[in-house]
Image: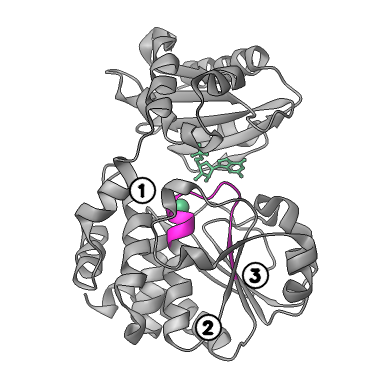
Amino acid sequence: MQPEEFARYRDAARAIAAILSSSNRIVLTTHVRPDGDALGSVLGLGNALSAVGKQPRLILPSPIPASLGFLPGSSALEVYDASKHDAFIATADAIVCLDFNVLDRLDAMASAVAASPAVRLLVDHHLEPAPGFHAMLWDTEVASTAELVFALLLLEFPGAFSAAVATPLYTGILTDTGNFRFPRTTARTHRIVAALIEYGADPVAIAEALYDQNSPARLRLLGQVLRQLELHCDGACVLLQLRRKDVLDAGAREDETEGFVQHTLTVAGARVGVFISELLDGSDGVKVSLRSKGTFDVARIAEELGGGGHRNAAGAVVRGISLEAARQRVLAMIEAALHAE
Ligand code: 5GP
Ligand code: MN
């Protein structure tokens, strides 16, 4: 893979590398409820920095999903605890924010990061980063943050690649492209993936670790959810919903509902998919996940609900609302947007 492919990232990569190279106390972090790209990006960069002699702390605002525990280096991930981490964050030299761009996606960890005098760096592919980052490797045209981490390493730390770096980055790309199916999957994405395989990522082992680990409880819960599938807007909108009680009845864990939303767009003719779940921690409210095909913009709808995301994948947490009220509200918004086309 030629570094020239990443020529337009050169200045940003150089600025970030210079800061990291001169920093001793480095924090890497990502958004709450981390997915494959979030954790893959943190671990890919974290393992690479370790290889060049740094000892970054990988501090995350929420627990690591068991399904991603296979990623090399994941035992070094720490779940934020103010009493354990605030002192380090307050005296860090650099904090790298990966796969998110507004500090409130750090939940309880946000205030400590906002208050820290550390240099703040961004590596991300979401729209509209908040101000306040000293250097940004930011491109909304790439499907995954992991591709940007790959570019940063190829341009600035090419000696750091190993299977321990390639495996998380491959995982980030695989999951954020929906297994190479989503629109921003490009020839360059595949060239990056080819390089990662050469560095030691094992496609068979990674796919098995990601996709062939269902518990019977998860599949039964999915069955229950799929049985209640609803079609709206002449079949253009497919809706799935989940009650907390169903999760408890099935004996499934909270994180086992990850990915249910993907089934919505597999219905022929579906252009918008909605998955609404009661908050599984028992607090009052719902999580809304939105997916779309083509030009239908679900980020706008998520933003109106107080969340955000990309045109074809977005989400929001809406507090203090019942599942039924959220369902009506979201459906009305989608109906209006489809009518306005
Ligand atoms: P998911 O539906 O898988 O949770 O999220 C899909 C995408 O929507 C994520 O990659 C993220 O960009 C965005 N997203 C999900 N939940 C939130 C949220 O609560 N706030 C914001 N700003 N974005 C979200
Ligand atoms: Mn991502």
Residue holding disc 2: 15
Mark 1–mark 3 Cα distance, whole angstroms, equals 26 Å
Which of the 4 image quarters holds residue 100?
bottom right
Mark 3–mark 2 Cα distance, whole angstroms, equals 12 Å
Question: Would the CB of label 2 be found within 8 Å of ligand 2?
Answer: no
Residue holding disc 1: 175
Residue holding disc 3: 133
Q: Is residue 34 magenta?
A: yes
User: Residue 26: percent from the left, percent from the top?
Assistant: 61, 78
Q: Is residue 153 magenta?
A: no
Residue 211 is left or right of residue 22, and the answer is left
Give neighbour class at mark 1: few <14, some 14-19, many 20+ (Cα, 10 Å): many
Secondary structure state at the residue bearing disc 2: helix
User: Residue 189: percent from the left, percent from the top?
Assistant: 27, 59
- Viewer-nearest of labels 1 and 3? 1
Any part of residue 56 in sight: yes
Compared with residue 155, is residue 245 higher up or lower down, i.e. above or below? above
Q: Residue at x 30, y 19 (%)?
A: 267
Give neighbour class at mark 3: few <14, some 14-19, many 20+ (Cα, 10 Å): some
Residue 186 is labelled as none
Give neighbour class at mark 2: few <14, some 14-19, many 20+ (Cα, 10 Å): some
First in sequence: mark 1 or mark 3? 3
Rendering colour mode: one colour
Any part of residue 340 in sight: no
Mark 1–mark 2 CB contact (< 8 Å): no
Image quadrant where one finds the C terminus? top left
- Looking at the rendering, the stretch of residues picked out in magenta corresponds to 28-40
First in sequence: mark 3 or mark 2? 2
